[in-house]
Image (tube, grey):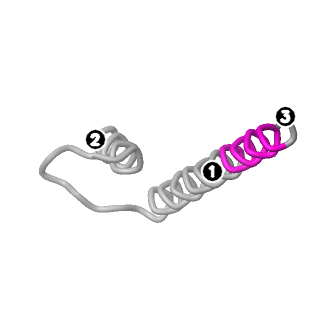
Amino acid sequence: MSTLELKVYDILKNRFNEKEVFLTKQDKVELVEKIESSKNDIIKWLVAMWIAQMAAIIFTIVKK
């Protein structure tokens, strides 16, 4: 399971029992916000890792 699936599962597990599965408008908004924040976090980490890789490559080239 991915992190996003675990977050969705936790939200649904806390809100509903196994017999009732329906989403209110507020639940949908909450899910969308959590998904967006997860996407933003992933993008931030990818950019940070890319910058670190480029810095390491440039440092290696300059050091020679």
Residue 57, labelled with which disc? none
In the figure, 25 relative to 1: above or below?
Answer: below
**Residue 59: image location, x then y, percent:** 82, 38
Q: Main secondary structure of the magenta part?
A: helix
- Residue 14 vs residue 54, the one in the foreground: 54
Outermost residue on the top side: it is 63
User: Residue farthest to the left?
Assistant: 19
Q: Which residue is mark 2?
A: 13
- Tell me the magenta residue range: 48-61
Q: Is residue 63 left or right of residue 10?
A: right
Q: Position of residue 29 (x, y in %)?
A: 53, 61
Q: Residue furthest right?
A: 62
Check disc 2: other Cα within 10 Å, few if <14, some if 14-19, many if 20+.
few
Q: Is residue 2 above or below residue 31?
A: above
Residue under the image location 66 percent in, 44 percent down: 49
Label 1 neighbour load within 10 Å: few <14, some 14-19, many 20+: few
Q: Residue at the location (41% across, 50% down)?
A: 4
Badge 3 is on which residue? 63
Q: Nearer the viewer, residue 58 or 27?
A: 58
Q: Quadrant of residue 23?
A: bottom left
> Looking at the image, is mark 3 or mark 2 earlier in the sequence?
2
Left/right of residue 45 with respect to residue 20 in the rendered view: right
Mark-to-mark CA distance, 3 and 2: 54 Å
The residue indicated by pointer 1 is: 46
The answer to whether mark 3 and mark 1 are in CB contact below 8 A is no
